[in-house]
Image (cartoon, rainbow, N blue to C red):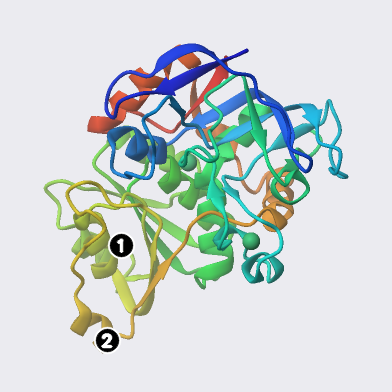
């Protein structure tokens, strides 16, 4: 048996209970969980924003790191005792997306913890299929808490800013929303050489943003945010990130851009938007703005991220503000209802 925080009803406390053990398939591994990040994506799933998430004793949790405890016969790259992290986009390894290096967009892929076919890691152990393709070894010196702190947010922010948007040294980057993924985007943008202006309602979040690389901040709320960003950047941001996913931050991000700027959408929408946000299309055409989406990062690109952490250019551990137990997860998710969390929170007791 293993201990898990189990979802039986949306927007209701998870039940911490004993559930069936897991075994590895021929190409899979079982991992004893040492740490698992708590993320706004977990909150979306818990609230019922994504009906694909089942409520029949489902287990959330998609940002784990841990120790391999069992290995399938066909696994070549992992052994019992290895320290591993698991990027949440679990892929087949043989479709055209996987072969072309975009396994996070695998046509047969599963998102860890977001589907009944692949229960997550808010549990003392979990299983991962096709491990040679989907797991990554933790580099020397990286702790499970650091890996869990990276979670989907650092990986997504890194893939979005380092690989998809054109962020150059000296560019202005605006980041709208300084929760976990927004702070990650601040840290990554600064490491890539951008001047970063961070935007949030919460002044504590902005103080954290300054600690991890923001050179300017804008307190949202009463302020005309796009005008404030246009003023700070002397004409608009070259790249602007909506790290929240509500209509207001998405629109503010686009309206903050300089001509030919790029809007990077990393936040997923809430019940209010249900996936739809209206955009200033004529203005976007007139200024040749781009709208870029990003979701996760393929495991094959994690070494780039690890290299920047090893060189202290990226400091994900600085963003981990709270270590909690499995029994605390419900409370921490509920506190996201009114944006009551700061930085990244990680489960370290199972
Ligand atoms: Zn695939
Ligand atoms: Zn996440």
Circle 1 sits on which residue? 232
Relative height, residue 314 to residue 343 (above, below): below
Percent position of residue 252, x then y: 23, 61
Dividing the image into four equal quarters, which quarter contains ligand 1? bottom right
Task: Report whether the residue tagged 2 is closer than 8 Å to ligand 2.
Answer: no
Q: Residue, x 23% and y 41% (percent of image)?
A: 201
Disc nearest the viewer among 1 and 2 = 2
Front residue of this view, candidates 258 and 144:
144
Q: Quadrant of residue 10?
A: top left
Residue 190 in sight in this render = no
From the viewer's perspective, is 348 left or right of 230?
right
Quadrant of the rendering where the N terminus is positioned: top right
**Residue at left 50%, top 37%?**
113
Residue drawn at point x = 58 percent, y = 67 percent: 163
Tell me the crowding category of disc 2: few under 14, some 14 to 19, or many 20 or more residues within 10 angstroms, Cα based. Answer: few
- Of residues 52 and 125, the one nearer the viewer is 52
How would you rate the neighbour count of disc 1 (Cα within 10 Å): few for under 14, some for 14-19, many for 20 or more?
some
Quadrant position of residue 332: top left
Going from N to C along the chain, the mark reached first, 1 or 2, is 1
Residue 34 in the image, given as x and y percentages of width and height? 65, 22
Q: Report the side of 113 relative to 35 (left or right).
A: left
Q: Which residue is mark 2?
A: 285
Classify residue 280 by image quadrant.
bottom left
- Could you tell me residue 170's position as x and y percent? 51, 68
Residue situated in front as seen by the camera: 55 or 136: 55
Image position, residue 308 (x, y; %)? 69, 50
């Amino acid at each position: 048996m293993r201990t898990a925080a189990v979802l039986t009803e949306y927007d209701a406390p998870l039940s911490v209970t004993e559930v069936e053990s897991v075994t590895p398939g021929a190409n899979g591994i079982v991992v004893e969980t040492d740490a698992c990040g708590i993320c706004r994506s977990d909150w979306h799933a818990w609230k019922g924003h994504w009906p694909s998430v089942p409520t029949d004793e489902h287990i959330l949790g998609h940002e784990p790191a841990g120790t391999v405890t069992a290995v399938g016969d066909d696994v070549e790259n992992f052994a019992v005792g290895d320290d591993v992290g698991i990027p949440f986009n679990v892929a087949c390894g043989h479709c055209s997306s996987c072969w072309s290096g975009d396994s996070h967009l695998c046509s047969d892929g599963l998102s860890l913890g977001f589907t009944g076919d692949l229960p997550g890691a808010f549990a003392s152990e979990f299983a991962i299929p096709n491990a040679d393709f989907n797991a990554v070894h933790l580099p020397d010196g990286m702790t499970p808490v650091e890996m869990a702190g990276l979670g989907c947010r650092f990986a997504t922010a890194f893939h979005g800013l380092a690989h998809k948007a054109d962020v150059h040294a000296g560019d202005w980057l605006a980041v709208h929303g300084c929760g976990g993924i927004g702070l990650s985007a601040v840290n990554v943008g600064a490491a890539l050489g951008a001047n970063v202006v961070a935007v949030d309602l919460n002044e504590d979040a902005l103080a954290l943003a300054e600690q991890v690389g923001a050179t300017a901040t804008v307190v949202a709320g009463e302020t005309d945010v796009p005008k404030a960003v246009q003023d700070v950047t002397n004409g608009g941001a070259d790249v602007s990130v909506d790290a929240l996913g509500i209509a207001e931050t998405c629109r503010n991000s686009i309206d903050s851009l300089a001509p030919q700027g790029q809007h990077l959408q990393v936040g997923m929408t809430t019940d209010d938007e249900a996936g739809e946000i209206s955009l200033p299309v004529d203005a976007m055409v007139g200024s040749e703005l781009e709208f870029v989406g990003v979701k996760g990062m393929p495991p094959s690109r994690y070494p780039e991220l690890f290299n920047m952490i090893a060189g202290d250019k990226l400091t994900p551990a600085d963003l981990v503000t709270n270590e909690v137990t499995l029994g605390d997860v419900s409370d921490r998710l509920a506190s996201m209802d009114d944006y009551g969390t700061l930085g990244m929170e990680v489960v370290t007791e199972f």
